[in-house]
Image (tube, coloured by chain):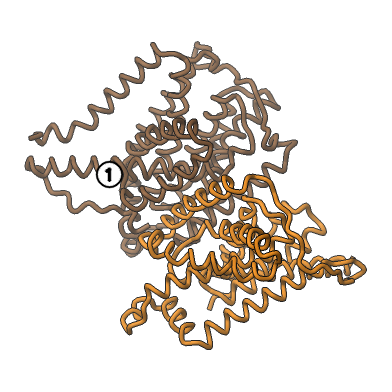
Amino acid sequence: MLSNLQARYIKPVIMALALLALVLLGLFSSSGFLSLAIIMIIYSIYAVSYDLLLGYANQPSLGHSLFFGLGAYGMVLPVLHWQWGFWEAMGLALLAGAVGGLVVGFLAVRVTEAYHVILTALIASVVFLLAKNMTPLTGGSGGLSFTVPPIFIGPLKLSVYESSTSFFLVLAFGLAVFLFLRRLVGTPLGRVWVGIRENETRMVSLGYNVYYYKLAAFVTASMLTALAGALYAIRLRYVSAEFFDFMWSVLPFIWVIVGGIGTLSGPVLGVVLFTVFQIYVSDWWTHYLIIFGLLILAVLRWAPQGVMGYVNQWLRGRELKAGGKDVGPTKSHIENC
Amino acid sequence: MISNITFLFLDGIIWGFVIALIALGLSLIFGIMGIINMAHGDIFMIGAVLGLVFGGMMGSFWPALIVAPLVVGIFALPMERWVLRPYEGKPLTTMVATIGISFIIQQVTLMVFGGEPHMVHEPISFTIQMFNVSYSGYKIFAAIIGIFCIALLWLGLHRTNFGVYIRATMEQPEMADAIGINTSLIRAVAFGIGAGMAAFGGVLAAPIHKVFYLMGADVILFSFIVVIVGGLGNLAGTLVAALLLSGLEGVLCAFFEPINARVVILLLMALVVVFRPRGLFSA
């Protein structure tokens, strides 16, 4: 029914349309709606970077709240205490994320699956406790408020306090990250990651230094997570120790699993679906975490490749029917996680 | 000063026996089924809560000490068979799935019992003079019960047929299956035992710490550190690690604030991960 050409181009077309819709949104909608959209884009940056780590390099981490918080504090503290500008503070946030990623990755990447999960979760938990305790530095759970400095881009001076500026700024970041990662997974580096995911032993026997590649993925993901954290702090004009909360490590996993692991576009969908769900259900029932828990169990059991996973399978089926090349059996590698 | 440190070390070790119960359950569950049980701390909490409830119903602590873990253990069996079985062998999946279960347990407890911490009275109150300090006799008593329970576990594992089946399933599940051991039953029972032990620890700990729906969070954090240092699935290693780390944390509390003592323990764990990733006591 769908010709080969059509099946191949359907996704990019949809994405271009979505982008157009977002731009129109930014120009014409209410600030309440924009607010939600901004949050979702920030979450998408986080989700997509987590997909890089989990879906491509096959590193199951549950400690990313650490980098989220590091990015946020890396952004806020210099602005608050030393009056740094926007880009300098952002640079520091990214650096903090990278360094954090190096340190944690150094420990975590070398161990097997089970230990990796536990280790990352542990380190993040302890940092969370520390942050809650070191109130003079971090503001504890109460947090620190700050004023976001103006953003200088060439001759322009922008302020995040205008809601449409804020939206387009975040959209620009989101687009940049998404395109960057799309590009990255197409490079030889990206192919190595996929190779590691599919058959690590084989990659080792082929002579690849798997440890360094996995560490590279870890650090890239942690840097981008830090970016998301910094943007989140900017959005809220606030940061607190709660940014290190374990929930921030679980959420990206949910976004990626619900949306579609290893697809990069899936996590964005996961963010949208799940955030909407969260808003509605938590409004309705204080104990919405129970539904959250049931949902986790259900998705893991019956749909581990997520929405995009199904979509991709369907598209591939169409492509085969229309006479396209057979790209081999699809493998939901989450089954091997 | 020395007596202070010795005192803290002993206090740590005494608490370590209770932690060992929980950590052993965690290690056992991982060793047999590959489940990283994030809900283990909540099972501990449920044990404490049920201890409170049954204690109230039966008028005394002692029957609750037996009944609560039994109830938890019995409920855990079908839980493993029907809910957790599909995820087994996949560490990340089990971790997130049990996080989901953890949310459910915590929220249900919150709904039913509310968020107020409850006090449970020590069933036997006496103090012992240790190094010039009046030390709670109940804690020592709890440790002794813990030792007894651990000894029972060891006996069960090494001196009974069923224990042989459990150890076989742990080491070579496929072979065990091939020679006709009912590994499905073994796994469900092992999960029940692990959960029961955590619940038992919870009941024991209830008079020491208040009963509160989030009380599992700190315990599970420490238990995971213990299990990594001792080696996932390595029961003897886990026991030694529980005692050592607990005693060490106690001593460190003489010099640092509790949170910083915890950070030092974490750093030690990091060292173990770098130099002996299978655990300090692995074969």
**Residue A207 placement (x, y as % from top left):** 35, 61
**Which residue does the numbered mark 1 point to in the structure image?**
A309
- The tint chain B carries is orange
- Compared with A13, A118 (above or below) is below
State which chain is coloured brown: A
**Residue B189 placement (x, y as % from top left):** 46, 72
In the picture, residue B242 is in which quadrant?
A: bottom right
The subunit letter for the residue under badge 1 reads A
What's under tag 1, amino acid-wise?
A: Gly
**Residue A20 placement (x, y as % from top left):** 31, 19
Depth order, front residue of A55/B97:
B97
Q: Who's the residue at 40% across and 45% down the image?
A: A295
- Compared with B158, A272 (above or below) is above
Drawn side of residue A299 relative to residue B117, left or right: left
Report the quarter where the N terminus of chain B lies: bottom right
In the picture, residue B88 is in which quadrant?
A: bottom left
**Residue B174 placement (x, y as % from top left):** 34, 77
Mark 1, other Cα within 10 Å: few <14 / some 14–19 / many ≥20: many
Give the structural element (helix, strand or loop) at label 1. helix
**Is residue A180 visible from the viewing direction of this image?**
no
